[in-house]
Amino acid sequence: MIKAMIATALMLVALNTSAACSMKRPGEAPLMPDGAVASKEEMYEAQLVAESYIMLAEAYMDCKVMNSRQHRALAARVSTLAEQYDEEMTEFRVRTSMVAVK
């Protein structure tokens, strides 16, 4: 299902070159799992979901159907999502790379 979402996002980006945007405005950004407790699979799925959201948001912004305030708000959501993902991924990597000490 995740691969289908990414394929759909890429297809929409490729096909959406006109000024009249047929895409819906992306809703709220998805929630990222807690890197301190998330499994490898959960983090991988979070990566795919975040990338898909970002691609859809960028494609929608390229439509130029928003005013500057709306554009900045969506760009801020994208930036915040990317930062949250990076923070959780860093926490996940730190946790999974720890070596058990007696």
Image: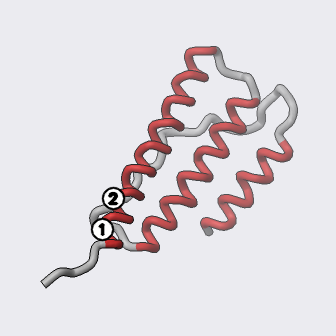
Residue type for callout 1? Arg
Which residue appears at 66% of the width and 45% of the height?
Answer: 55
Separation of residues labelled 2 and 1 (CA atoms): 6 Å
Answer with left or right where residue 21 lies relative to residue 56: right
* Residue 46 sits above or below residue 80 on the image: below
Residue name at image x 64 percent, y 15 percent: 67
Location of the N terminus by quadrant is bottom right
Which residue type does callout 2 highlight?
Glu
Q: Residues within 10 Å of mark 1 (few under 14, many from 20)?
A: some
Kindly identify the residue that appears in the image at 82 percent across and 39 percent down.
16
In depth, the one of 6 and 27 nearer the eye is 6
Looking at the figure, which quarter contains the C terminus? bottom left
Count of numbered badges drawn on the protein: 2
Residue 91's label in the rendered image is 2
Q: Where is residue 89 in the image (x, y as percent from the top left)?
A: 41, 58
Image coords of residue 51 (percent x, y): 59, 52
Position of 54 relative to 71 (above/below): below
Residue 100 % position (x, y): 22, 81
The residue closer to the viewer here, 20 or 14, is 14
Q: What residue is rendered at 69% in x and 65% in y? A: 4
Q: Name the image colouring.
A: secondary structure
Disc 2 residue crowd, few under 14, some 14–19, many 20+, Cα 10 Å = some
Q: What element carries label 1?
A: helix
| Residue 38's disc number | none
Q: Where is residue 84 in the image (x, y as percent from the top left)?
A: 41, 46
Q: Which residue does the numbered mark 1 point to in the structure image?
A: 95
Mark 2 touches mark 1? (CB < 8 Å): yes
Farthest-out residue, left: 102
Q: Which secondary structure, mark 2?
A: helix
Q: In this view, does 64 lie above or below 28?
A: above
Q: Residue furthest bottom?
A: 102
